[in-house]
Image (cartoon, grey):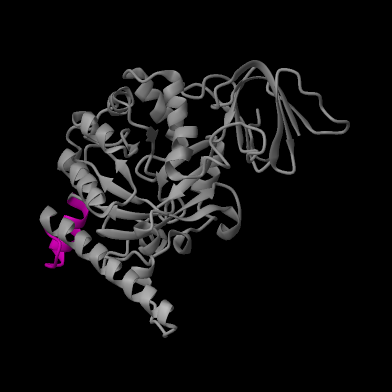
Amino acid sequence: MLIKNGKIYTMAGMIYENGSLLIENGKIKQIGENVEAPCGVEVIDAEGGWILPGFVDAHSHLGTHEANMGFEGNDTNEATEPITPQLRAIDGINPQDAAFKEAARGGITTTIVSPGSANVVGGQCAAIKTYGRNVDEMVIREPLAIKIAFGENPKRVYKEMEKMPSTRMAIAALLRQTFYDAQNYQGQKAKAVKDGKPFAIDLKLEALLPVLEGKLPLKAHAHRADDILTAIRIAKEFNLPLILNHCTEGHLIADYIRESGFPAIVGPTMSANSKIELSNKSFITAAKLIRAGVKVAITTDHPVVQIQYLPLCAGLAVREGLGLEDALRAITINAAQIIGVADRVGSLEVGKDADIAIFDGNPLQTLTQTLFTIIGGEVVYQRRV
């Protein structure tokens, strides 16, 4: 397939005003101003539109919290005990969820599906493509991170059950105990292996070993400034990699977040202030964090905001001071880098997956239409006039 006659934002440092892109076997083979089409290749004329890498939503519940399904289609939270790292998001994703088609229609080709935030440790996240019938074939990377949560959500859920945690202190204490238990388990397992003795696998603690080894980050649901700082404090105590998720009051403590070295996934901002901890929610957060030197992605937290509106969320951040290219990076290469899948998606470069979105103009503007969405070199959405 050859895509031609469009303004290509590679998100890798180059912009081609009238560029072409050649796809072969689901990968990008060539990109530039003058790319010749091999004989017989399918040609898509972008007709002067914008060609970008498919958008990446760095945090959602796509396929686990299904559209119009109520309890029967909601597998986001196992809100029965607070520590559940053994849960895997892929076991709750339904690729038949109607929202997958809406994602493709919006130019979103990759999303990170996470367990919800009812539990202090919610489970394992997965990066998936937004098109397919079998989730195993849609996976880019799994597990990708371990979801943890601070603040009102776990407090509310377990207070109603009259069990720990019902305070922020208890959330932090449970996390610390969990990681001490995981460290002890790690040592016991290593000794058993060394001694050639049998060892009983504990799925909860086994899931945390890659975090202790620095191979998987924690993905921390934290809205309020103090919760963000607690997440940073605990990650530093145990020398663990961390992604700050939501980061609603991040603009109030941008210097501390920069000093931590941890990135932030900001949002959902285009939603109601439904909780006390959202009181300072603002579209200025992404711009202030980026100006402070923090790597930022923008999220919808689907279904809080429907996933197809990811570019609109980025556009509203532009209105509040975020630069256009920074906004595009926040839903492409920054998002891919933060979640650890930039070797495959997030930018248009030779050898990467041919996940591409073509628009009739600036995709961050409300009147712009998606013309084509391509995943793995296959057209999965085409606008019909």
Instruction: Locate residue 39, reporting x and y percent.
Output: 88, 31
Extreme-right residue of the structure: 39
- Residue 229 in picture, x, y percent from top left: 19, 42
Q: Quadrant of residue 32?
A: top right
The x and y percentages for residue 383 are 63, 32
Residue 67 on image: x %, y %: 43, 51
- Would residue 232 be seen by someone viewing this image from the given angle? yes
Q: Nearer the viewer, residue 204 or 163?
A: 204
- Boundaries of the magenta span: 152-167
Most extreme residue toward the bottom, as rendered?
197
Question: Would residue 250 be found to the left or right of residue 202 on screen?
Answer: left
Tell whether position 156 is magenta.
Answer: yes
Q: Quadrant of the C terminus?
A: top right
Asked whether, in this view, residue 253 is left or right of residue 244, the answer is: left
Q: The N terminus is located in which quarter?
A: top right
Residue 276 falls in image quadrant: top left
Q: Residue at x 20, y 60 (%)?
A: 176
Residue 197's place in the image compared with 160, above or below, is: below
Q: Is residue 214 left or right of residue 9?
A: left
* Residue at position x 25%, y 69% in the image: 181
- Residue found at x 29% / y 27%: 283
Judge by depth and name the residue closer to the eye, 211 or 121: 211
